[in-house]
Image (cartoon, rainbow, N blue to C red):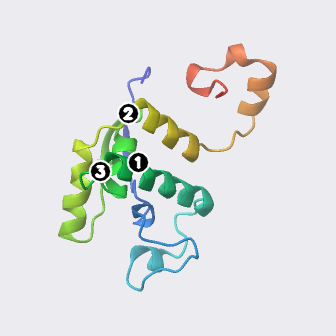
Amino acid sequence: MAEGVGILAWSPLDGGFLTGKFPRDGSMAAGTRQSQLQGYPPVNRERAWDCVDVMREIAADLGGGVTIPQIAIAWVMARPGVTSVLLGARKLDQLVDTLGAVEVILTQEYMARLDAVSALPSEYPEWMLSRQAPQRLPEQFEPKA
């Protein structure tokens, strides 16, 4: 990035939530991090499930055994400024699977789909600037079409 600061992404799978293992009804298998964390960290679960749905579609499009966790980690690693990702696998097969993310190449179309579904709502002052003074916004904050 322009300032030369890198990002070390922590918990890119949200304690396992973004693996696609958990249904929208909120049921969590006993012994999983999600059952133990009880909503920590606090994220918008509806948006997270929407992200999982898109990652599931992309994994199916890519085929070849590409998994939802690999898509999630590949997306994080492809973000500007991200220098590394801290994984928190509890089992060897989880670690092996997530390490497979380095082989996943996401097209611009896939990145755009994931960017759109994961986008955070615009908050003050960004929404005000985008309406009244868009020329003052840095490129990364320009309104998205």
Label 3: which residue?
63
Residue 85 lies, with reference to residue 81, above or below; the image says: below
Q: Are marks 3 and 2 in contact (CB under 8 Å)?
A: no
Q: Which residue is mark 1?
A: 58
With respect to residue 16, does 1 lie above or below? above
Q: Secondary structure at mark 1?
A: helix
Query: Which mark sits nearer the N-terminus, 2 or 1?
Result: 1
Distance from the alpha carbon under mark 1 to that under mark 3: 8 Å
State the quadrant of the N terminus.
top left
- Few, some or many residues within 10 Å of mark 1 (<14, 14–19, 20+): some
Could you say whether the residue bearing mark 2 is in a helix, strand or loop? loop
Q: Residues within 10 Å of mark 3 (few under 14, many from 20)?
A: few
Residue positioned 32% across, 56% down in the render: 67
* Marked residue nearer the N-terminal end (3 or 2): 3
C-alpha gap between disc 2 and disc 1: 10 Å
Q: Nearer the viewer, residue 4 or 132?
A: 132
Q: Earlier in the sequence, mark 1 or mark 3?
A: 1
